[in-house]
Image (cartoon, rainbow, N blue to C red):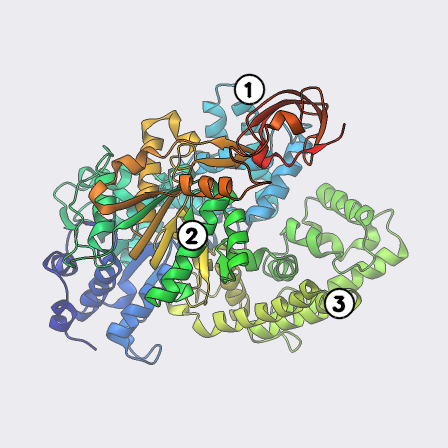
């Protein structure tokens, strides 16, 4: 174990102050790349070195990846090389808000079920489950899902829950027809969740906050456990998370010592409820708190920081801190104006090839950032054409695959037999003779009896209208589930003792493995073969989770409320449900990473390209609605710039294709706000246009015939997307000209001939 002095020796003075400040509220304003994770992990290690037991420390962050890295760093500092060989760290809780709340809710539900509103074995519904339930409620109210899309309604419900508004509270505030209708859906949606003994992600926060607020006993239970509370990325907390942290901390001097770390300049999740006021007003909530600023950047070169610093100074809602580095030199940021998105993508690919060939940068140390996922398609094509390996960061892709979701649905039913959505998904998958009509009869019977659907399956012979085949199939299905769970007890000789064994048995005995093997044999498809590999990987993930699970750090474990395997299964399903976007990014892969700016937060790359710096893209068109939204777009750009360590390429296209039509763009205002001395600007758009002119026939230029010669007014032309139309007017040559065409199906369109792909009909 390192001594205290060793823990402090390699820190800067501000970092050292933050680590040594152990008593009283503390705000650490940590600029991008300023070593905030080092400060948090050293502070935890320092507390333990002062004699603070690990079980009394709670550190909260936003992704499983960040939490895992923190635990690993603290362990290396104090615990040595062998996991669990330092007793001082036992019980240390480093986790995400949602994971903590899921575990606390199980404990609260066991102690005060009427207060919490769910039973301890509740299921966590993911986005797909939420959408299915919401759609069912909307249709049950005889509303149109076109007028009330489940995704939009769920976003409104999520916003309400983040503000700790239940359905009744939301209805009381509803002032127009849309809001009043959403309130009705919200009420039905919550009724459906409770009937299934399920919660969504927002419920985890809302129910925890409401339980802590309502029960002094629950508050004291938590405060007596945790004496030191650390919150990472505090600028990303929403109202519910703010309330939870405040209730855990209590009043200054009377509760745990609270330390929050964050950067208002990197607050980019306002669209999902994050409230920048939480960090800006921390000093008001905790009068007399100590504030320490970390402004020195250890990641990026001086030109990159100069551009980022000059950009973010244009925001008003912030706490200023000088962003600087002691490292001298560094290449200027390359700002390139391109002709269009294809030219842009080709230049980025060319730039990456140069970084690898000239600078020796590995593919995995490069990335492309963009504001919208729609920009990735052309970039992907350019990467493929250049032979550059790439991966796209798309969040929880593995767990969203059909075969994995089917296997998880079985496991979720085992953990919570009241989970209607999971039961509906797998009761006849693979096909076992329990059709939709039979399921509907069972559900209707269950509703009349006030029981769960699975709860009445064992009484299927009492249900009218079920065929002999359906009854036999239902009996086999119930027997199958009982064999895995010991008829719900998770005890007995048939029940697996290890989580990985349970997962493997479910995959095999359910018939999923055989079903996908049969599909692969029939189709000879690589995709179908990969399904089997994915099911095997799920078993591996269960094994890894079981090996790494620390029951002492889980406040919901060891209370005697559930058999060990059932507790482990619930914890595993929670970990799967709570995977975040950043957790999907594997820096060890030998490929360039393509990702949105939101997904890039918290990451760093040797060389990065930030594309699409145009008005309407970055800043996004929606940001024009308010100054607050525009400032968040500026922070998003700031985050993108500060992900680059050594080299940064920024691009802006003169034309960008929208819905098949090239549109003239305006360079982003953010480009003018960056320090010009940090930029090396070049206009490659004119260069590209000149090259096309010189290419001769077929590519345009002054030597090309006028467009009217090929597409005279009145002629009929065919467009691959819009169909057949009549040319009403036309100007210019075949490269730069435009035509106004009246199409039969979509009406009048103005097209740039270079991109229109027109075919003359008559």
Q: Quadrant of the C terminus?
A: top right
Circle 3: element type? loop
Which residue lies most toward the right here?
A: 468
Residue for badge 1: 177
Residue for badge 2: 348
Which residue lies most toward the front here?
A: 703
Q: Specify the label residue 231 is tagged with.
A: none
Circle 1: element type? helix
Q: Earlier in the sequence, mark 2 or mark 1?
A: 1
Left of 315 or right of it: where is 501? right
The quarter of the picture where residue 705 lies is: top right
Q: Does 338 appear above or below 6?
A: above
* Residue 467 picture location, percent across and down: 89, 53
Q: Give 75 or 257, whichever is nearer the viewer.
A: 75
Left of 470 or right of it: where is 583? left
The quarter of the picture where residue 356 lies is: bottom left
Give the alpha-carbon distance from disc 1 to disc 3, as whole Å.
53 Å
Q: Does 367 appear above or below 631?
A: below
Local packing at callout 1 (Cα closer than 10 Å; few below 14, some 14-19, many 20+) is few
Q: Give 139 or 596, whichever is nearer the viewer.
A: 596
**Can residue 91 be seen in this snapshot?**
no
Give the alpha-carbon distance from disc 3 to disc 2, as whole Å.
37 Å
Residue in view at x 27 percent, y 62 percent: 56
Q: Does 607 appear above or below 81?
A: above
Residue in view at x 41 percent, y 40 percent: 685
Circle 2: element type? helix
Residue for badge 3: 524
């Amino acid at each position: 174990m390192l001594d205290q002095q060793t823990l402090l020796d390699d820190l800067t003075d501000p970092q050292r102050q933050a680590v040594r400040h152990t008593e009283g509220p503390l705000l650490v304003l940590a600029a991008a790349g300023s070593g905030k994770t080092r400060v948090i992990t050293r502070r935890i290690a320092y507390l333990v070195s002062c004699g603070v037991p690990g079980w009394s420390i709670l550190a909260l962050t936003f992704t499983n990846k960040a939490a895992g890295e923190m635990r690993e760093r603290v362990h290396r500092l104090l615990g040595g090389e062998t996991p669990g060989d330092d007793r001082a760290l036992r019980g240390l809780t480093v986790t995400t808000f949602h994971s903590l709340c899921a575990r606390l809710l199980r404990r609260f539900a066991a102690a005060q079920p009427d207060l919490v509103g769910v039973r301890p074995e509740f299921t966590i519904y993911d986005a797909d489950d939420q959408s299915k339930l919401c759609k069912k409620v909307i249709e049950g109210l005889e509303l149109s899902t076109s007028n009330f899309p489940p995704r939009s309604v769920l976003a409104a419900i999520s916003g309400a829950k983040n503000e700790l508004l239940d359905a009744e509270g939301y209805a009381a505030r509803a002032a127009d027809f849309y809001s009043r209708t959403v309130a009705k859906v919200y009420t039905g949606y919550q009724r459906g969740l409770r009937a299934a003994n399920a919660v969504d992600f927002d419920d985890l926060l809302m129910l925890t906050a409401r339980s802590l607020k309502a029960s002094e006993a629950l508050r004291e239970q938590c405060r007596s456990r945790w004496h030191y509370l650390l919150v990472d990325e505090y600028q990303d907390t929403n109202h519910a998370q703010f309330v939870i942290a405040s209730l855990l901390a209590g009043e200054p001097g009377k509760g745990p010592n609270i330390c929050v770390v964050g950067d208002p300049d990197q607050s980019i999740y306002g669209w999902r409820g994050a409230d920048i006021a939480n960090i800006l007003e921390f000093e008001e909530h905790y009068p007399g708190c100590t504030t320490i600023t970390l402004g020195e950047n250890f990641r990026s070169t001086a030109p990159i920081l100069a551009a980022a610093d000059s950009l973010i100074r244009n925001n008003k809602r912030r706490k200023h801190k000088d962003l600087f580095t002691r490292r001298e030199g560094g290449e200027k940021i390359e700002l390139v104006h391109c002709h269009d998105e294809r030219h842009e993508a080709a230049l980025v690919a060319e730039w990456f090839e140069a970084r690898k060939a000239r600078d020796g940068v590995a593919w995995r140390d490069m990335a492309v950032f963009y504001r919208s996922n729609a920009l990735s398609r052309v970039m992907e094509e350019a990467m493929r054409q250049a032979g550059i390996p790439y991966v796209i960061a798309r969040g929880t892709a593995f767990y969203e695959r059909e075969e994995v979701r089917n296997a998880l649905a079985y496991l979720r039913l085992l953990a919570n037999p009241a989970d209607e959505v999971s039961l509906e998904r797998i009761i006849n998958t693979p096909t076992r003779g329990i059709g939709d009509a039979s399921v509907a009869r069972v559900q209707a019977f269950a509703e009349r009896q006030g029981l769960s659907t699975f709860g009445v399956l064992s009484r299927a012979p009492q249900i009218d209208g079920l065929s002999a085949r359906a009854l036999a199939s239902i009996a086999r299905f119930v027997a199958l589930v009982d064999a895995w769970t010991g008829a719900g007890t998770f005890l007995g000789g048939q029940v697996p003792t290890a989580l990985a064994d349970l997962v493997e048995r479910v995959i095999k005995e359910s018939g999923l493995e055989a079903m996908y093997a049969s599909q692969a044999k029939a189709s000879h498809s690589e995709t179908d073969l990969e399904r089997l590999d994915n099911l095997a990987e799920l078993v591996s993930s269960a094994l890894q989770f079981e090996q790494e699970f620390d029951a002492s750090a889980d406040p919901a474990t060891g209370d005697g409320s559930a058999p060990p395997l059932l507790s482990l299964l619930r914890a595993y399903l929670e970990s799967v449900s709570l995977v975040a976007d950043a957790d999907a990014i594997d820096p060890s892969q030998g490929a360039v990473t393509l990702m949105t700016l939101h997904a890039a937060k918290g990451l760093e790359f040797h060389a990065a390209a930030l594309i699409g710096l145009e008005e309407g893209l970055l800043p996004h068109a929606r940001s024009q609605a308010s100054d607050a939204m525009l400032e968040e777009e500026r922070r998003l750009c700031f985050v993108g710039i500060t992900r680059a360590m050594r080299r940064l390429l920024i691009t802006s296209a003169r034309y960008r294709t929208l819905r098949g039509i090239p549109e003239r763009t305006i360079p982003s205002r953010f480009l003018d706000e960056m320090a010009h001395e940090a930029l090396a600007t070049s206009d490659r758009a004119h260069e590209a246009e000149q090259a096309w002119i010189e290419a001769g026939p077929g590519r345009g230029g002054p030597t090309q015939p006028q467009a009217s010669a090929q597409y005279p007014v009145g002629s009929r032309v065919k467009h691959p997307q819009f169909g057949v139309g009549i040319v009403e007017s036309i100007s210019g040559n075949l490269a730069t000209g435009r035509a106004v065409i009246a199409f039969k199906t979509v009406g009048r369109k103005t097209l740039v001939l270079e991109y229109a792909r027109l075919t003359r009909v008559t």
